[in-house]
Structures are given as C-alpha cells and as structure tokens.
Amino acid sequence: MSAPIESKLHHKMDRPDSDNLLDRTAQGVISAPLDRPEGPLKVTGRATYADEDHPDDIAHGVLARATIGRGWVVGMNTAEVRAMPGVLDVIRDPRLLRSPAQGQAARAPVQNPAEIFYVGQPVALVVAETLEQARHAAQAIRATYEAREPVALVDGQDYAAPPGKQASQGDLDAAMTDAAHRIDVTYTTPAMSHASMEPHAAVASWNGNRLTVRCSNQMLKHNVAELADSLGIRAKNVRILSQYVGGGFGSKLGISHESVAAAIAAKRLGRPVSVALHRRTVFEATMRRSETRQRVRLACGADGRLTGVGHEVWVSNLKGETFSEPVTQATPFTYAGENRVIGHHVARVNQTTAGSMRAPGEAVGVPIMECAMDELAEAAGIDPVELRILNVPDSDPSTGKDFSSNRLADCLRAGAEAFGWSQRRQPGQRREGEWLIGLGMASAVRVNMLEESEASVILLPDGTARVETDMTDIGTGSYAILTQIAAEALGLPMDRVTTVLGDSDLPPASGSGGSFGAASSGSAVMLAAQAIRMQLAKRLGCDEAELTLKDGAAIAGNRVTPLAEVLDGDTLKGNGLIQPGKAEKSTRQASWGAQFAEVAVSALTGEVRLRRLEATFACGRILNEKTARSQCLGGMTFGIGSALTEEVMNDPRDGHFVNRDMAEYHIPANLDVPAMTVTFLPDRDPYANPMQAKGIGELACCGTAGAIVNAIHNATGIRVRDFPVTVDKLLDRLP
Amino acid sequence: MPAPSDHSITLTVNGTAETLTLPDPRVSLLDALRQRLKLTGTKKGCDHGQCGACTVIVNGRRINSCLSLAVMHDGDQITTIEGLGAPGALAPMQAAFLHHDGFQCGYCTPGQIMSATAMLDEARAGWPSVVSGDLTAPSLSDDEIRERMSGNLCRCAAYPNIVAAIREVADTAPEDAA
Amino acid sequence: MRAFTYARAATPADAIGAAGRLIAGGTNLLDLMKLEVETPDRLLDVNHIGLDEIAPDGDGLRVGALVRNADLAADDRVRRDWPLLSRALLAGASGQIRNRATTGGNLMQRTRCPYFYDLAAACNKRDPGTGCDALAGKNRNHAILGASDRCIATYPGDMAVALTALDAVVEIEGAGGTRRVPVGDFRRLPGDTPERDTVLEPGDLIRAVTLPAPTGGRQVYRKVRDRRSYAFALVSVAVDVTVTGGSITRAALALGGIAPRPWRDPAAEALLVGRSPDAAGFAAAADAILQGARGWGENDFKIPLARRTIIAALAEATGTDVRTAA
C-alpha cells in the first residue's frame, strides 16, 4: 500500500463557528442514539483494562502504607521482609510519589516516600512472585518514624486567602442592609471520594530504555510527561496504554503511585511488574474532593430581584498542592446582582490529597447556592422557579461579557412544566401515611471549556476509515461519538469506521476531564475528517461546501461516485488540530439545566426516599443521545450520593480516612436511584467549538443535590445545612 | 507458620474442566480466574465483597468470587462472563445491556450481567426480596430489580439502564428467548 | 493474608474438636483474613459436612448450620410462619453474599468497627490490652447498649436479631457434648474481654439453629441505614406482636445495630402486653428498652433513632396510624 496522502486542518477557536458542518452533512448518524461500538467487548468481558494483560514472567507489587499522619520514615524492616517467601524486592526509591499528579500537571507531583504527609501514604513497594506473597509481605512492613503532630482536621485551622481568588464589586454589606429580603447562611459539604469501580493499576515493562505502561489514566499526553518527569527519563521513551478505563471521575486525571512504582520495580527487576492498588489504598492515597464550608449571602428587593450575592468558601488540601476546590466557579455569572463578594480560603491538613472530582467547584458550589436561593425564595414569598427566572442575567454580571448562550430560563420553564412543579405545596403539607412528601428544584450550571486536541482520520482505499487519537474513553462514550463524528463527516455507515484510542503513541488529545473531552477531541476528529473532505472535493473538482458524502459515496453536482473510485487506490489521511482561542475569552460560556426532585421522608425515622428526579439540560449539540443521557443519569446519581449518602470520615486524631472501603463509603446502590428523566433542549453554541457541542457529564451533577435537599425541606420544613442529609440530621426536628 | 503445600483442584469453567495446581491456598477464586486461567472478564473492584464486580455463577448460584478461596471450589461448575456469550453471539442479557446502555466504563458490567442472569433464575424460582410486599408471592417490579441488583455497585451509575435491560429480558419468557 | 494450611472436613465429627478455624461461606472470615485482622494458621472447610437441611422440629423448625442465608430466606415454611426471619435475612448483605453465607457463620459475624478493621489502630477486640480507638474516634456506628469502656463495637448482623425475637436456640456440639444456647445469649457482652465475641469454646461446632413453634403474630423487620440497600444497620428492630380483641397479648422485640449482640428486654415487652396498640404505649416500651442507653459522641443520635424505629416498627406491625414519634 502506498503512503497515505496527508493534509492538515488546524483551527483556532477565535471566532464563532459559522460553517456548522455537522448540520449540513447527510449521513444522519450524528446525535443518533447508537449503541457503543466497544459495547460488545465490554458486555462479554473482552475489553482489556489496566491489570489484565499480564506477561508470563510478571511480578506483583503491593504498596505498604504509612501509619502516621506526619513526619519522616527513619527505619524499616526491609531485610526481614526481603527474606519472606517469594519476595523479590522492597523498594523505597525517592521517586515514589507522595500524591498523584493533579489534572493537566504535565510534570512530576510531589515525590519522596520518606516524608509523610498523611496516613496511608505509600512508604515502600514490595514486589513478589505472586500477588498473595506480595500482599502479605507488604502488610509485614514496619516503618519507624520521627513523628510530628498531624493537622488532622480543618476545625480551628488557620486558612490562607490567596489574593488571586478573592473578588468583590459594589458594596455587598450595604446591599444586605438595604435588602427587602436577605439570607446569610453557612453550609458544609464533606470530603468525597471518586470511587471508580476499577482500582488504579499499572503493568510496566521495559524494552531497553523504552517504557510501556498499561494503566488506567484519563489524559495520556499529560500522563506521559508526568511519568517521564517522575522517573527522570525522556517523554519520548514513555508509552502509556489506557484503551479501557474503568471510571475516573477525576481520580485518574494525573498519574498515580502505581505507574511510577511499577516502572521503577520493572527496571530494577528486569521483568514486567503489576501494581494494582488495593481498594483501601485507592480511597486513602489517591484523591478526594475537599470538604467545604460555604457562607452564602443573598440580598433582594421586594420584587425578588437580587441586589447582592456573596459566596465565601473554606476548603483544604495538602501542603504543596496548588489545586483547591474552585467552589465558586459558577457564582460570578449564574445570577444577577450588582453587589458581589467571592471569597476563597485554603487550610493545609494532613489528609488524602484533594483534587478534581467530577465538576470540581460546581458539584459542591452550585447545590449550596441553590439551597440558599431556596431559602431566599421562602423568605421573599416567591416561587423558587420564578425567583431564578427573575434573576437570570442578560450578561455576565461580574465581567459584563455576553453569554455565548444562556438557556437557564428555558430549562427552568421546560423542566417545571414537565415535572409538574405547580403541584408543589408549602413545606410539610403533603403526607402519605408515615411519609412526608416534598418537591424541590435547583438550577444546574457548569462552565464550558475547550482544550487543545489532535486526531487523525485515515480513509482507506476500500472506503473504510480509522480514527486515531490518544483520547480516552472512561465510560463517557468517546468510542461512540468519535466514530459517529467521523462517519457523519465522511458519509460512512458506522460499521465502516473504527476508532482507536488510549495509546499515547497516537496524536495527543485533550484527554477526558472537565467535560471538555467530547467537544475537544470530537472537534479534532471533525477537522481531520474535514481535511479529507477537502481532498475528496479537490479530486472531484468541486468546493468542499458543494460535496455531499453519504453511505460511502460522494455526491457532487449530479454525479454519485463510490468513495473507492474517488480514492483510486490511495489512502487519505487527515490531521485535525483544535485550539482554544478568543471565542472563549470574549464570551461567558456555560452549559445549563434545571433539576427537579420528589422525596418522601419518614415522619417517624427520618429516612429519605428519593422518588423522582427529572432534569432538563441545554448543552449544545448532542453527539449521541444515548450516551449523553447515560452521562446525565450518572451525574445526577453523583448528586444523589452527595445529597444523601456520601461522606469521607476522618479520624480526629490523625486525620486518617476511616471509612476507606465500599461497604462504609456509601456510593448510591441501585435501589437508591429511582426512575429518572433527562430532557435535552435543542441547542447550538457557535462560540464553543466547530461542532457547537458542549460539556455534559459534569453539568448533570451540578445542582442535583440542591434539588433533593430543597425537596426534603419542602417535605418536612427542615433545613439541613450540613451535607449529606442522613437521618441523624433530621431526627430532632421531625414532627 | 505452616509450610505451604500444593493443592491440585479441578474447576469446570464455562464447561471446560481446568486442573490447577495451587502452591498456595490463599489464591481467591477471583485471582485464580483472572491470573491463572486468564479469564479477566471477571473484575476485581474491591476484593472484599463490597461491590459485586467479581460476580460469577457457581453451581447455578451467583457469588462474589473475591470472597472465596479457589481451593474451596474443587469440583465446582463455574460460569464467567466469557462463558455467557461472545461478541457476535451475545447472550440475551448481554444484548439487552448493550442496547439499553446498561454500562458506561464497563468495569462493573460483567459482574452486573452475571448477577442479573442468576437473579432472574432466583426470581423465577419465586425467591422473595426485602422489598417484596408479599413474601410468598413476589412479583418482579422495578423496585424488586433494583433491590436484587443492589449488590452490584456502578459508579458511572447506569442503574436506570441496567433496570431497563433486565426488565426486557425478564419480560421475555425463557421459551421465547431460546 | 498470612499463609495457612487448608483441609476439607467430610463429616461433622471431623470438625468437632479440630484445631484451627472452620470456614463455611467465608464471606466475613476471608474479608478479615485478607486484611490480617484474622490470621488462622489452619482452615478447615466445613462446606461438605452436611448440616444443610431445614427440617420440621416438632411444631418448630431445625435449620442446619450450613443452610445458606438465601435458602433460609426463601424456604416456604420460613416465609409463611417466620416471615420476620426471611425479612431480616433479605435485609442483609447482597444476593451474592446470601448465596454463600451460612446460618452458623452468620451468627459468628464480627463487628464492622473501623478500628477493629485497622491494624494500625488500638483495638481490645483484635489485640487485647491495646485500648479502644473508637471511644474518642469515629463512633457513629457504635453501641449505645451493652458496651464497656473496653469496647463499644456492635454486632452488625440482621439474621440473629430476628432469631432473638423469635426465641431461637443455637445447638452447639463440643468436647463436652451438645448444648443449647438461646440466640440472644450466644454473643457475649464485651466487659473486660471483648476479644471473645461468643460463648463458643475452641473445638465447638454449631450444628443447627432451632425455631420454636410459630407464634402467629404480626412480624416486622425495620432496618434503618445510610443507604437503601447493601449497608449495615444504624438501627434495626425485629418485632413479633399479637393483637387480640384490640389489645396486645404478646410482644417480642429485638434490636440490631446498637449493641454487641441482638438486644432484647423482656421488661419492656411486658409493658406492651395488655395495652391497646397506641403511640404512647410504643413510646413507653421504647423508653424502657433504652433506659440505660448511652452514646459516645457521634452515635448519640442512635438513642432517639432507636426509639423512633421501635415506634415505627410497632406501628407497622399492629397497623396503628402513628402520626408522630416525638
């Protein structure tokens, strides 16, 4: 086969899109609710995850943990453990990580297992012939410490207020004083854990200086840089494979302990090494979402129009981490009000590293703002939906910029109608036997982003195509939508397009995170396909805009030509590159929604039963209605967990993660999740990207918890300002 | 500490008798399947019976393979996800999960499908659940499916789609499906 | 998991007086062994010794120690005559675990105290004499009745709570022959020796659990937990109550999740008998049961929660419309 004929299409998003290619193509697969192309592999157990491709000579590594919260390791019984059956090595290499890398870090995180910052921090890797031997030997590790008093809890800690994270305009204090109605409330949310179903794992092997790691990561181009920097080797010598990622939710944005440990061990032993984190290690040594304390002040006139919005937050992280939960991210632009204060404070504690977890910021900030709005609606005697509609701003009230698109009011109206919001009564007015029934709602909002992403599309002489990019599919549907985008743009049936992902040797994509993955990697694929369309148009002697591709044929003028004939034995390769540009800076971009919940609360025991959850979203073009809906169901369920069940518990003496297993850290089980409805409003956002699609998976968990907690208030008349709403917080105020 | 001794066991896995020599009785059924027999479709999510990702069917019953030693299953009949169907020849439950998008990342999925398959047998045998109104005559409502599947956690939270997939298979009488 | 030797027992006689630990379903023991909370050097597999039948025992039922939780819950006789037992079993764990867990093994289930599960923590139950980190730690799930200052762990199971309310008896065979212990007395209170969970002696084998004749009462198992399914109880209440001619003629009530063993208080039950079923009577019984209850900080809420759950369970069992449990 001859070398492919290549062409590039590089697009910087400086202007709103005016071409809208996917609305003028003809294949009709874009947006369709198609099954996932990799689905058959997943439902038959044939998809290969991180710890599932073991060479015969593999050795097994298990991490040993620190049992103090702060100090230094000064000794260890390594000789004793080395002598245990099957043990090959006990590794205390200073390159072992303290913390996983934060998302998009692209460099080594804090390293060195000798200085301890939290209980459960890995102190050594024990490698043995079998998993059973390694697990026992790791449990036999005894470190001696020079211990320091850990900062176990945030209670009573001094918080720093980073100057770049504070903002104010107007005079909020005066607005509060002058307001017809005001609320000034403080809410707390607990630390939470991603709890992806696949524990972090890595299998490392070396071929000379070239390292290959099969692992479970979300952003391969950054992960390569992080791993190389951590090991002190060149990035070109690192290959990462993550074709199937068993959930991430932010916990696998950056590399974690297992990749570095496996790579070091494999090099030392000269054989491949698997390091699969124990579930307890995943909980205590990867990432958490920070707990938050949030003070919300809202002031409005007698007409309900907001005059002031204050949102001050207190979060925590380990020393040396720049990330801090961006709780107020959507506050500057969600609602109107000329007097505003944003406050952000960070404490340094000796607990599990805090990092990005699904919708960092809005996932905890929006529900609290929405609870506060519910309190204000009650104070002002205005319907909660009306109060929100009344305060949808015409432009970003903090910057004056226009919205690229603001569909909040549309979502609120459509959602309220579909849900039957008008049936809502005053708090405590509806009862069915033992159960008090309540309805609640919340707005949903999440910033929308675009990240640089590259992809190749190869059109083979037989008229089939292959998509190649190092994008990951963490359950989000990347395989499906990238296949659909290429098929749509090239006019091919789905089964004639193959998508290859999760290999860092392929063109570097945005990776999966921040809900920018589909839009960013999808735009790159669309551009790559567009480059091929241009080549095909040239071959047919027409403009690309006059070219129609459908069912494997090109239609130009009155002529229909099979692609194989157009190609005439050639292979065409398109390379697409999308980059963010001025369009993002010139407007305020967000995705929007409204969520409605119905709950029943036992008047006797305080047990909460979520009965219904319905959401309406506007998030640009939907690329696959089926996978998009699934993303929303998943996000909404995250919201159920944060409203009702999920909480990291830290020991008050040493800060350790007490409930570090799946029996005691309660992610929602099937019975916790009722029937749910998801509605997408038809939407396009030309400022977002050339596909006019936006982020989905995170939006769906922004607001949900607020709707549920507001419904509990409507059922019982009780305001719980400490998430999650477990029975103990309702008992003393039940009727 | 006792000296390890070899255990030779025979597991009939997906219809094939597999004889394994285990030098160490600590090997869980899960690790025997994944590491010794290379049947990695059965997943390790928590290794402590807290998530259900490792669910297999042993002698007709769904169990957590992580909470069993391989040596305890000498002579047993084991069905894993690989034995249920293959791409291009999906079992009805696998096809229903695919069409209803009863999964996202796919990691809990084999356990969900094995659990659902055996759960329907339990329901057909008239077994009740804690949400059954009448213990002596339970019927498989959506809440019954939810409760009976609550031993299989899914962090992507495909639960509504999982319920829909199981509902479809449950509503297809076994003779129709054959 | 520490290395051990493994052998299969063929008959009950192989297991009686045997050295090492017996393993049946293994759903709790292997969990603890993986974490090295339990470190037996010998495992004797009793899954093939029989004792897996449910048979009539006079007007009652004799349940073999190796009957699986799933089979016991689905047994037609149990469903019809002892529905409380079915409901409690079905409220526990998951379908998968109930397919393995056995009647005898479930009685032996160890606490879920996170400090017991944490080798780095002080725990008198796991390592006698080391102290109890739960006392001043995260003790939301801990006991409000029957605890000592050495140990505030709870028994986490459901089945035994129902069996206690149903006056079931454990049949144990050991070196000294066979003895019968009420399920309610099978688990010990911690006192100064929290390391001993039960009255079993080394070498003992649980052969069966016997249920006396059905009471014909209305039976309810109410379990309050942090997740709707697949979670341990914060508080559970097993109720078996008979109402005749508008008044309560017999009441049995056991609590789970709040003590080192299923908790039963005959004096409180006596308060109910002879009264018409009403909120005030339920509250009086609940207050009597909880008279000596104390919290340890984070679990203080279990006292009002237990009170309310008792009232809710009695209301449900007697069909009484109780509007408030305040």
Image (cartoon, rainbow, N blue to C red):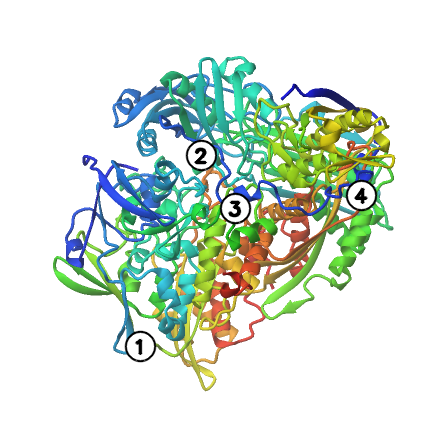
Crowd band around label 4 with a 10 angstrom C-alpha radius: few (<14), some (14–19), many (20+): some
The reply to whether callout 3 and callout 4 are in contact (CB within 8 Å) is no
The location of residue C50, given as percent across then percent down, is: 23, 61
**Cα distance in 3D space between marks 4 and 1:** 67 Å
Helix, strand or loop at label 3? It is helix
**Subunit under mark 4:** A
Q: Which residue is mark 1?
A: C213
Tell me if A350 is positioned left or right of A220 in this view. left
The location of residue A283, given as percent across then percent down, is: 48, 36
Q: Which residue is mark 3?
A: A43
Name the amino acid type tagged 1: Ala
Q: Are marks 2 and 4 on the same chain?
A: yes
**Subunit under mark 1:** C
- Nearest to the observer: residue A497 or residue B132: A497
Label disc, if present, on residue A341 of the rendered structure: none
**Cα distance in 3D space between marks 2 and 1:** 54 Å
Which residue is at 31% across, 50% downward?
C26
The reply to whether callout 4 and callout 1 are in contact (CB within 8 Å) is no
Helix, strand or loop at label 1? It is loop
Name the amino acid type tagged 2: Glu
Name the amino acid type tagged 4: Asp
